[in-house]
Amino acid sequence: MTETTIPSPLNSRLTILLAVACGLIAANLYYAQPLTGPIGQALGLSAGSSGLIVTMTQAGYGLGLLLIVPLGDRFENRRLMLCLLAICIFALVAAAMSTNAYAFLTASFLIGVGAVAVQVLVPYVAHLVPIATRGRVVGNVMGGLMFGIMMSRPIASVISQLLSWHAVFFISALVMAAVALILRLSLPQRQPAPGLRYGAMLTSMLHLAATNRILQRRSLYHVFLFGGFSLFWTTVPFLLKTTFHLSQNGIALFALAGVAGAVAAPIAGTIADRGWSEPATVFSMLAVAMAFLLSMFTDSGSPGELGLLTACAILLDFGVTANFVLGQRALFILGADVRSRLNGLYMAFFFAGGALGALIGGWAYARAGWTLAASIGLGMALAAIAYYCTGFLAKPSPPSSLSDKDTSPRG
């Protein structure tokens, strides 16, 4: 018995719908990021503990990636998405109504669990397009996802300034309810072919993690880069407030500049389709390293340094987005029967890095300010470059039907 999927090719209307849905769902992971100050103050969290606001959401997301996303290889995809969105809506309302740190952090964890619906949607897209254009189409959808992530920060800042941080989560709950309804009415069902039971599926993920070299390398590249990304966006609001004396609206405008980095997603997908993944990977890592290096010269609070910090944010987001899409495209060509599991592992690994980056960022800024935080971010980018270079010493992969570029020792 074969899987039941959509009989017609992915059209532009459905592509746009999926891109918008991905962006709106993924935004829930980052609404709290520019609000760590006011949320932490309202809930009694110290500056050093404020990183937990972001860390708990990403921890829930990471757990969902490992335990829930693989179900996309076994259960009907649309129903799975809707169940996850229901969890997300409940958690958003709980966060909005929280009056103490324990309740808010618990709700944050569940927001992360529900938001993994976006990682059921992305492999869903990959099932619908041929390999020759998969990078471009997935890149377009991921562009929507990254746009949502990057817009989440300025939107949250503006709503918090005009209303309150509670309103950010109430409004998002309403938006998620609308998204769930639209997806329910617009998306056909996709029932995967019968496969492994859940326990065997989880066991198979351990095997994939232990033996799939492309998964290992691509995951670790992005563990370092996404850790730096999370560190930057968790700590930079403190820098903007204390050094540049920006209001919450000013921080929102700064975050808006980072949206420009979302253009990297379709560009990276197209480049990967043309077989240029390796040079593009090196460029993305160098971009992140350069962003952190230059940001270390922005500690006096002058207008010129604010402009430089803005350019660093754009360069950082561009590099992280490009590397993410390149990694996802490399994994999605490895087989439809394990695509959800590969995607879940990939995302779980680097979101663990993101959670750690947020936690380290809050600690570093509280201990020694931006210089220490940016130095750690630079170290993460350099670690990714160093690990990429070890691929030149690796034993080449055996021949396969994939191109040499896609099966290189460096992933």
Image (cartoon, grey):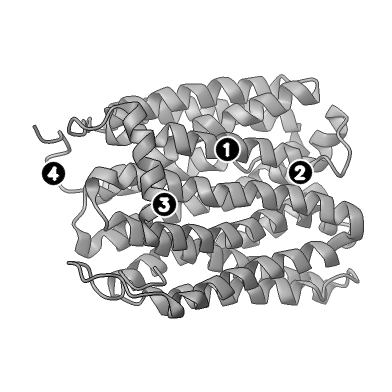
The amino acid sitting under disc 3 is Ala
Q: Which residue is mark 4?
A: 8
Badge 1 crowding class, 10 Å Cα cut-off, few under 14, some 14 to 19, many 20 or more, is many
Q: Position of residue 280 (x, y in %)?
A: 44, 75
Q: Position of residue 17 (x, y in %)?
A: 35, 42
Q: Which residue is mark 2?
A: 51
Q: Earlier in the sequence, mark 4 or mark 1?
A: 4
The residue positioned 28% from the left and 45% from the top of the image is 338
Describe residue 8's horizontal placement relative to residue 209 as left or right. left
Q: Earlier in the sequence, mark 3 or mark 2?
A: 2
Q: Quadrant of the N terminus?
A: top left
**Viewer-nearest of discs 3 and 2:** 3
Describe residue 106's horizontal placement relative to residue 75 as left or right. right
Q: Give the structural element (helix, strand or loop) at label 3.
A: helix
Badge 3 crowding class, 10 Å Cα cut-off, few under 14, some 14 to 19, many 20 or more, is few
The residue positioned 55% from the left and 63% from the top of the image is 320
Say if mark 4 contacts mark 1, CB within 8 Å.
Answer: no
Label 1, label 2: how far apart the Cα atoms are: 16 Å
Question: Residue 237, can we see it?
Answer: yes
Q: Give the structural element (helix, strand or loop) at label 2.
A: helix
Residue 210's tag is 3
Say if mark 1 contacts mark 2, CB within 8 Å.
Answer: no
The amino acid sitting under disc 2 is Gly
